[in-house]
Amino acid sequence: MKSQLLLAALLSTLAHAEDIRLQPPKDLNGYFPFDPPSSLSEWDVRKEQVRRQILVSQGLWPMPTKTPLNAVVHGKIEGDGYTVEKVYFESAPDFFVTGSLWKPTVIKGKVPGVMFAHGHWQDARLALAEDDVVRREIASGGERFERGGKSIFQSLCIQLARMGCVVWQWDMLSDSDSVQFSREIVHKFAKQRPEANTTENWGLYSPQAESHLQSIMGLQTWNAIRGLDFLLSLPEIDPERTAITGASGGGTQTMLLAAIDDRIKLSFPCVMVSTSMQGGCTCENASLLRINTGNVEFAGLFAPKPQGMNTANDWTKEMATKGFPDLQKLYETHGKKDNVMLLRGEHFPHNYNAVTRSAFYTFVNKHFKLGLPSPVIERDFEPLTREQLTVWDDKHPAPKAADPEFERKILKWFQDDSDQNIRAAEPHVLRQGIETIIGRVYEKAGDVEWTLEDKQDRGDHLEMTGSLINKTYNEELKVTWLYPKQWNGRAILWLDDAGRSGLQNDEVTKLVANGATVLGVDLLLQGGEPVKQTAVVKNPREFAGYTHGYNHALFAQRTHDVLSVVRFLRHAKVGAHENPKTVCLAAFGPQTGPIAIAARALAGEAIDRAAVDTHGFRFGKVLDYRDPIFLPGGSKYLDLPGMILIQDPLPLWIKSEGKEPEGTALDSLLK
């Protein structure tokens, strides 16, 4: 009777959906809209999820150990209404952050502190523009002074100091006095380096670095966090009046720090908040960062605190109609609509010019209650030279420049520190990290329905083929059911490296003979020729972040498929049929074994029993970021053993992980 009820339910057909994952992968030039929430409770859940995704993508979940900064401040220069000092400190052991610390000449009480990140202006903190460039800027209305217009960086710092603020303006990696990484590595990386692609002591951009979530962007985000630590260590800083600003790549750094660090109280990212291009440089991209999110939502994470931004004749030019209205709605939901502002500047090219800077000064003046006449306009100054500002000298020698050994050394330090911190952390830290790198939790596996395409009577069982359609995510899976006519209420999902064709074996025959229904599934891109290399975006530069910063890896997508099947078995409304009493998972192939471990880790008690052979697989051994089993972050959370660990104490028969399991896999599945 039960078999007839199930069959009747399975015979109901539904419209097929084309699997959206078969489309070309999304890249940084896609469309990244922001859908504001209808309530603050809804936003609180989403905000936590996106914020954790940023932290995980940057290698900052959990946060690395904050070692002593060992800050050195020297070479004080007295200017007209300001002072400037040379600074370097260690964001991690022997990893130096360099910059300039600008202060008012006279400081009374606690004053605001401002972080100033720069973008892709080469030698930004030290360079001065040529006279003809400055004159063109003045003629276009972008600058006001022939002297002060030579440096947008000095202009902003000196003006803020004259307004009573302390400013920390630091170098991004490879720029000005930051010499430990080359510009070619930080901004121009194009091809994988065989010498850096090793399973021990690897370099940046290698599959191992990606597997441990180590990137240039992550290092720069960490430097920003430590820079805020440095700024707040100064006794004159008011911790309730801290701001960050920057343009272009500095706008990206501004958005991220404001999104993840609650100590920032005002944010002003320039020419970067957009539903369009998200940041073109290797220093602005990281695997996992923008999957199902983007820069406008990153800016939204700062709500309801004061935030300004601007447009220019670049990828931000449509922000007034695409993106900013949604941010206004979010701020309005918080009851703070006036706390977000947009300066229109489409008649200017990509910039942080005097007009934009004036808007920032005025915004700071208003929200930090400085009491200055509004709008705030810059005064001219005599720019300082490279020699006056450079941090390194005979008494303060620079570290070795562009040192490959240092690159390996600092990544090893972060890896060892991460392993130690994860092992010492609460269990939810490990679980949430794994959930984030896979990108889908079981509770959000989707609404899955069945379409029957063929049915054959095989004597003691029925063989049915069809599709499982995940309506939530527009995904489709081909499935074969071997359904015994005397079903015992047990369902076994059988994963095979060959897909559902792997059901043709003696072990499956025995399971069906024992009354279990066995399901075989073609996971994404199974069922045909085996995938040897996964698809990447059209960007010719061999950086995994350009693809996997916007798209799930195939390993993660196949794990999603397993969750879809389990969700269907547990929650689908299939006519009068009772759902299986027991759901089991079996996988013994070198590719599907690790997928089964990942899926079981996320599905938890929804899978009663699992039998898996991992073949000793480790994500940290994958040597090609286009390998079908490559997973960004796969090694970060104690590699495959971490995924095994969070399944304890659920029943798991596991082979190739040390001690041989008791009994046979089939016995474990039939218990």
Image (cartoon, rainbow, N blue to C red):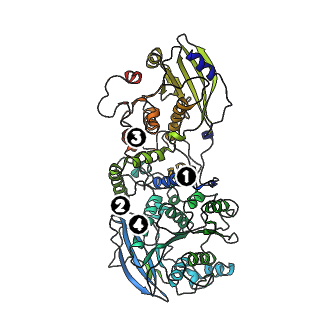
Q: Name the residue under label 4.
A: 226
**CA–CA distance in space, label 2 to label 4:** 19 Å
**CA–CA distance in space, label 1 to label 4:** 27 Å
Q: Which amino acid does label 1 sit on?
A: Arg
Residue 544 visible? The answer is yes
Measured from the top left, where is residue 392 in percent x and y? Answer: 38, 76
Disc 3 or 1, which lies upstream in sequence? 1
Quarter of image, res 105: bottom left
**CA–CA distance in space, label 3 to label 2:** 31 Å
Quarter of image, res 239: bottom left
Query: What residue occupies the far top of the structure in this picture?
Result: 459
Disc 4 or 3, which lies upstream in sequence? 4
The residue depicted at 38 percent of the width and 52 percent of the height is: 202
Classed neighbour count for the residue bearing mark 1: other residues with Cα under 10 Å, few (<14), some (14–19), many (≥20):
some
Classed neighbour count for the residue bearing mark 2: other residues with Cα under 10 Å, few (<14), some (14–19), many (≥20):
some
Vertical order, 589 against 68 (above or below): above
**CA–CA distance in space, label 3 to label 1:** 24 Å
**CA–CA distance in space, label 2 to label 1:** 38 Å
Q: What residue type is labelled 4?
A: Arg
Q: What residue type is labelled 3?
A: Met
User: Do tag 3 and tag 1 residues touch (Cβ < 8 Å)?
Assistant: no
Q: What element carries label 3?
A: helix
Tag on residue 640?
none
User: Do tag 2 and tag 1 residues touch (Cβ < 8 Å)?
Assistant: no
Measured from the top left, where is residue 568 in percent x and y? Answer: 55, 31
Q: Is residue 556 left or right of residue 412?
A: right
Q: Mark 3 points at which residue?
A: 643
The residue depicted at 61 percent of the width and 31 percent of the height is: 449
Q: Is mark 4 on a helix, strand or loop?
A: helix
Q: Mark 2 points at which residue?
A: 406
Vertical order, 589 against 395 (above or below): above
Q: Mark 1 points at which residue?
A: 46
